[in-house]
Amino acid sequence: MTVRDETKELKALDASIEQMKASEPERLLKQLTAELSLGKGQVQRTIELLDEGNTIPFIARYRKEMTGELDENQLRAIEERLGYLRGLEERKREVLRLIDEQNKLTDELQQSIVKSVKLQEVEDLYRPYRQKRKTRASVAKERGMEPLASWILTEPKTGSVEAEAANYVDANKGVDNYEQALQGALDIIAEMIGDDPDIRKWVRQYTFDQGILRTEAKDKAQESVYEMYYAYQEPVKRLPSHRILAINRGEREDILKVALDVPTEKIAAYMERKTIRGASIVRDLLITTAEDAYKRLIAPSIERDVRNELTEKAEEQAIQVFASNLRSLLLQPPVKGKTVLGVDPAFRTGCKLAVVDDTGKLLQVAVTYPTAPHHKVKEAERTFTELADRYAVELVVIGNGTASRETEQFVADWIGKRKAEKGELLQYVIVNEAGASVYSASKLAQEEFPDLDVAERSAASIARRMQDPLAELVKIEPKAIGVGQYQHDVAPKRLEESLGAVVESAVNHVGVDVNTASPSLLSYVSGINTTLAKNIVKYREENGKFTERRLLQKVPRLGPKAYEQCIGFMRITDGINTLDSTPIHPESYKVVAQLFKQLGVTDSAIGTKELTDKLAQADAAILADQLGVGIPTLKDIVDSLLRPGRDPREELAPPIFRTDVLQIEDLKPGMELQGTVRNVIDFGAFVDIGIKNDGLVHISQLSGRFVKHPLDVVSVGDNVTVWVLSVDLKKGRVGLTMRAPEQ
């Protein structure tokens, strides 16, 4: 190729890439619309809104007309898939340039790359042109065996292979005999077969469809939690995500050996069809070479691909389960108006106590030793009584960590004595304390409680978790909140992104009081980052409470875009403008003014029966047209006016409060109990029924009908009625069912 030709080819590629870029938006729009089964206009407007810097919560709440009322899940699906596809397009352009630089880019190859819909397909096509480390094939090429390989691939019907190979014997190149020359040529052919994208695609799919994953113990005498996998096998396509992650962990811990078995007869037949055209003097050589290519080059690589893909799918499932559980936990109803005694239980170091008032303000801390090894029960009773009397404690909240059930027994006994002596019925509840130790050792906790030790901070956090779970849990790194399955076995970055989105969604769903919210809570508000959250709190401390939403525009670095994104989720109670306490965005305040004018009411009518009656008589469609807004926006405005200050969490059932303790020895099959769902995983749900360990409701026992996934039936925090199925006293395990026994 001349220099002029190379320049011409380069310009042609540049033009092609520019054409790809120009057509990219329309191609991606078409693909997203088909994949997600959404309207073209919905997807296009969502992409535009995202590219303009709008957040998912803002779009979902305040741009419903533009997206056709897509919910957050649909919007996030568009955002995530769009990111993948844009990355794919960028990789396609990069691969085209890399192959073209080698002067090996044909029109057919270019079209195959352009039409690829998966990153794996692009990488398969690029594989033959990727710079490799030294291989048997590359050594053979250096020794000049490519012409011999090309001759073999012509599949000659006459002649002598040995004689042809003898022509390439050259001691100076390290080829001492025809056997070495022939082997070098076959190595080149094997690598060509191994790099063939069509072959790799077919074998990968066949391995998924027909492969069997087998596991065995490296030491069968060793006891471990992986014993069910000591001699285990299951078809690849049926492996559930929790088993994949468990097997991966067992392999990492050097307890399990894992292998992927695939029936090879059909693979051999397929590869023979793909590499051999007919009878020839090299047919047997090509069959042997194809077998070598599969065993040495394709099978190990495909096994890695398949296992990586299994792991990715399992991780995604685990992340989805964790995210769903986390959202349910964050949105647990707050227990308001109660002074709470928080207890962080322990054995040797004693139970740390913290009393907080109904606003969450810390009143006093203490430590007692009611459990082993100290057994200072009388002293502990005096401490509990003193705190309860001094602060009129109404509820005791116990963390579910070490010594929680022993501490629960003490608290229940103390409550019983207090009732007998004073007729006062206190209640207690056990909360999930996962992440409390992470928070208590954090810089944030040190700033909040500089005079307390780590365990005392933890007790305060446990108490506040009951008063306002969301406000307290946002202070903890989401992955430290233990409501998932194998969360420590998934990709940290992907887990962090997903859980961060869940917290953001929950915070904006509820809204925040800008005058009381912590920097941690504010940082999850739409459009607000950590720096802006701190600036808001600093401004509040220096200038006093915000009396109007518009004052947030004075916060340093909180610009117009951030203000637009966040302000609808900020609440100001008892402010100058009543609307500032609602989810109504300031951009709609003029609409509200027009609405009030049409209805003949004032701001004072917000939340009254008068406004309810007048709105009930109005036709929403006609009213929306008169006000110049969409019906979805009008409905949101009306709902906010009818129920100002509504906390969506309050619609959920409150936690189960207890006064006495249940022992596992008390349980009998068939016994009916009330419990709280603590965790949901792929194979069932763990329910707190008031004993030391949570009972398991297997997926088959969640309902009388088929259940695809436990999350379709239960969520973290649900109060459920269960019946005891089985009790294993030795292992401390209880099997439960939510299927009512036949009478």
Image: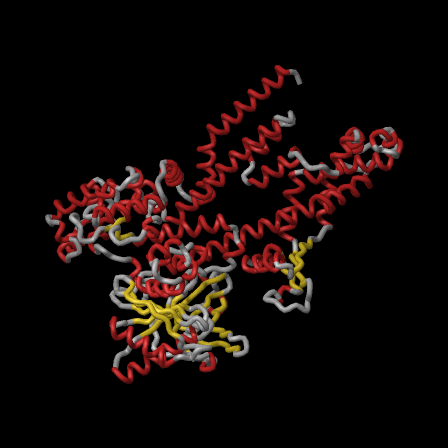
Above or below: residue 320 compared with residue 627: below
Question: Residue 265 or 414: which is nearer the viewer?
Answer: 414
Q: Nearer the viewer, residue 79 or 369?
A: 369
Say which quarter of the image contains residue 144. Answer: top right
Vertically, is 564 above or below 158? Answer: below
User: Residue at horizontal 56%, vertical 24%?
Assistant: 13
Image position of 386 with respect to 30: above or below: below
Name the residue at the front extreme: 451
Give the image location of residue 730, x and y in percent.
Answer: 54, 78
Residue 27: x, y in percent?
47, 34
* Front-most of residues 146 and 281: 146
Nearest the viewer among 356 and 647 is 356
Which image quadrant: the N terminus?
A: top right
The scheme the figure's colours follow is: secondary structure
- From the viewer's perspective, tell me whether residue 377 is left or right of residue 286: left
**Which residue is depicted at the point 84% across and 36% down?**
180
